[in-house]
Image (tube, rainbow, N blue to C red):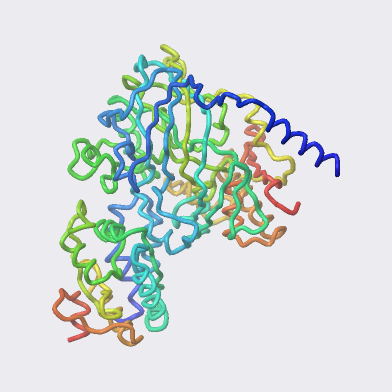
């Protein structure tokens, strides 16, 4: 008999001889507030909404320190499954994004306070997905056809039949977390976005189609023209898609209404800085947070901020490949991001001055070239990989005119390396 | 109108209502570039038939650059058609009738007119939104007929282009 076997037998005999031990399961201390997911879609769920307006009522109340459990939906509201394909992407109705769970009123919180939200746990669904949606994403002018990758997820890695040889580490965060804006914010934000849209900027007006709650934000609702879309992150947080908001970090969000009315949704199992294809590994999840009210701090913290520790190191790769992007461009072209400026100067220039967007594009396209050349992936697979495992980072914003954005590929994702 | 004009007309005639409802401008461009044929996962026969229609259009009307769009449930067809994001779809005749009358499971959606192009596989309809251009309807109906996929509908509201073809 080996030493290991002896140890096993010894262990089992000890267990048999021991008296029955008290079970710890029944000893509890947490106060939990559970915001449950009900029904198949956001439209079926009283705890779900997908527009912002202060008239949207809180669905629960919690005290500071309570463990608030948000059962969240994926960004596209549960349309896709492991056996989905590009045909399913072609039938997406984007007017439904993003289904948010909540809002939850925090006792004692008022307009002018800051809500400190500590992420305690994120339990992802078993399934997640990354898609290329035509017309959406950083390289939307190059990737014009739908593409779908379904991921099988555990608490350690996500793998996909469509991405052979790749395992993405579990680094989940809440893509969307925020507080409900007040009436003054609705007016101010609508005005500035309307002004931007008027000159051709990408700003989305209120859209009653697919809006929830329909009685407030849908066609014929009481606030149809004043319910904000959830696509842009704003001073109230929302769809920030910042991967450093990992479990253990604390997100500071200004309060604009009585109770703050906290919401969470759009969990990302993993994402690169940039989320370049337009989607991360999108998933439903159960998110647990606690809150603390920082009275009067809204005077100083006017947009979300994040407090954290080693989480920022834990998500770093142990090996990487990096590309360097400058703001160069082809003469005779206007980058899609700059067309709304209608500058006659841009078209004939071979490069732009102090332009991080063009630098980011060039870093990313070099990275996609690198991935396809080195690992044999298609350009669509490489774009998806970049969206979930490549970090776009600012190199410098001083060496005029060529500011630098870099693209950092996490080589840990390659199973055979 | 000739077949060569199919895409040009798609851009001119269909873009306007679509742009009013979709949040991303280039999503509209995609739906101009491809003639999408709607189906849904709740009745996978619709998906198979939509794939047949797309294959037939690829042979008979390649200018359409048709492809299948598969929603998660039949309500998605009503939602996309009702908001100018989809103009052609396959549903069972029973489901199409329910959609037109806003009956279960389409409560909460505005009645979506069903203008038939062809009967597929006996019990299914290929149909178009009312704003689908007449010439498009005629060309698609002709392509489906030539591909041996469909027959003339009887006792149903016909799309004006299909009526011109089957007459």
State the residue in front, A290 or B63. Answer: A290
Q: Residue furthest left?
A: B155
> What x and y, as percent, mark residue A58?
30, 28
The residue lying at 32 percent from left, 68 percent from top is: B10
State the residue in front, A133 or A210. Answer: A210
Direction from residue A417 to residue A252 in the image, left or right? left
**Is B131 situated above or below B104?**
below
The residue lying at 72 percent from left, 30 percent from top is: A14
Direction from residue B106 to residue A284 in the image, left or right? right
> What x and y, as percent, mark residue A102?
36, 32
The residue lying at 33 percent from left, 83 percent from top is: B149
Is there any visible trace of residue A347 in the rendered image?
A: no
Q: How many marks?
A: 0
Direction from residue B43 to residue A27 in the image, left or right? right
> What x and y, as percent, mark residue A147?
50, 60
Direction from residue A174 to residue A184 in the image, left or right? left
**Is A91 situated above or below A391?**
below
Residue B160, quarter of picture: bottom left
**Is A391 situated above or below A245?**
below
């Amino acid at each position: 008999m080996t030493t290991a076997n002896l140890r096993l037998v010894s262990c089992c005999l000890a267990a048999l001889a021991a008296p029955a031990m008290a079970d710890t399961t029944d000893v509890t201390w947490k106060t939990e507030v559970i915001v449950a997911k009900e029904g198949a879609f956001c439209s079926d769920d009283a705890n779900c909404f997908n527009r912002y307006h202060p008239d949207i009522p809180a669905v629960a109340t919690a005290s500071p320190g309570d463990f608030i459990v948000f059962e969240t939906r994926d960004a596209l509201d549960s349309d896709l499954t492991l056996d989905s394909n590009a045909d399913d992407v072609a039938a997406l109705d984007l007017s439904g994004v993003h289904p948010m769970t909540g809002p939850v009123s925090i006792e004692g919180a008022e307009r002018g306070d800051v809500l400190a939200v500590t992420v305690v746990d994120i339990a992802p669904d078993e399934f997640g997905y990354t898609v290329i949606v035509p017309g959406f994403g950083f390289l939307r002018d190059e990737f014009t056809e739908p593409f779908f990758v379904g991921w099988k997820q555990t608490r350690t890695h996500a793998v996909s039949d469509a991405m052979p040889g790749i395992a993405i580490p579990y680094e989940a965060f809440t893509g969307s977390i925020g507080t409900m804006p007040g009436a003054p914010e609705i007016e101010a934000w609508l005005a500035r976005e309307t002004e931007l849209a008027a000159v051709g900027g990408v700003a989305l007006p209120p859209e009653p189609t697919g809006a929830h709650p329909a009685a407030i934000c849908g066609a014929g609702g009481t606030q149809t023209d004043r319910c904000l879309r959830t696509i842009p992150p704003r001073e109230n947080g929302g769809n920030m898609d910042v991967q450093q908001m990992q479990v253990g970090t604390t997100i500071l969000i200004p309060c604009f209404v009585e109770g703050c009315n906290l919401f969470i949704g759009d969990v990302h199992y993993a994402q690169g800085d940039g989320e370049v294809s337009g989607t991360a590994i999108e998933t439903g999840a159960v998110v647990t947070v606690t809150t603390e009210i920082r009275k009067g701090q809204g005077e100083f913290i006017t947009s979300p901020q994040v407090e954290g520790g080693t989480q920022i190191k834990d998500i770093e790769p142990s090996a990487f490949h990096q590309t360097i992007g400058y703001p160069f461009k082809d003469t005779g072209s206007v980058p899609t991001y700059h067309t709304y400026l209608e500058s006659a100067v841009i078209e004939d220039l071979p490069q732009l001055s102090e332009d991080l967007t063009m630098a980011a594009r060039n870093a990313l396209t070099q990275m996609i070239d690198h991935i396809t050349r080195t690992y044999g992936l298609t350009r669509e697979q490489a774009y998806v990989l970049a969206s979930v495992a490549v970090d776009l980072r600012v190199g410098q914003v001083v060496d005029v005119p060529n500011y630098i954005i870099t693209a950092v590929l996490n080589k840990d994702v390659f199973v055979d390396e | 109108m000739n077949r060569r004009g199919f895409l040009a007309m798609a851009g001119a005639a269909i873009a306007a209502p679509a742009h009013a409802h979709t949040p991303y401008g280039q999503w509209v461009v995609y739906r101009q570039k491809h003639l999408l044929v709607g189906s849904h996962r709740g009745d996978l026969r619709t998906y198979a038939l939509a794939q047949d229609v797309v294959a037939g259009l690829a042979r008979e009307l390649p200018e359409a650059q048709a492809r299948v769009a598969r929603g998660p449930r039949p309500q998605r067809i009503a939602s996309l058609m009702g908001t100018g994001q989809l103009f052609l779809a396959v549903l069972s005749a029973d489901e199409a009738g329910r959609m037109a009358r806003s009956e279960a499971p389409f409560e909460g959606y505005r009645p979506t007119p069903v203008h038939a192009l062809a009967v597929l596989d006996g019990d299914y309809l290929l149909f178009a939104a009312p704003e689908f251009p007449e010439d498009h309807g005629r060309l698609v109906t002709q392509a489906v007929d030539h591909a041996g996929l469909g027959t003339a509908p009887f006792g149903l509201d016909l799309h004006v282009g299909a009526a011109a073809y089957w007459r």
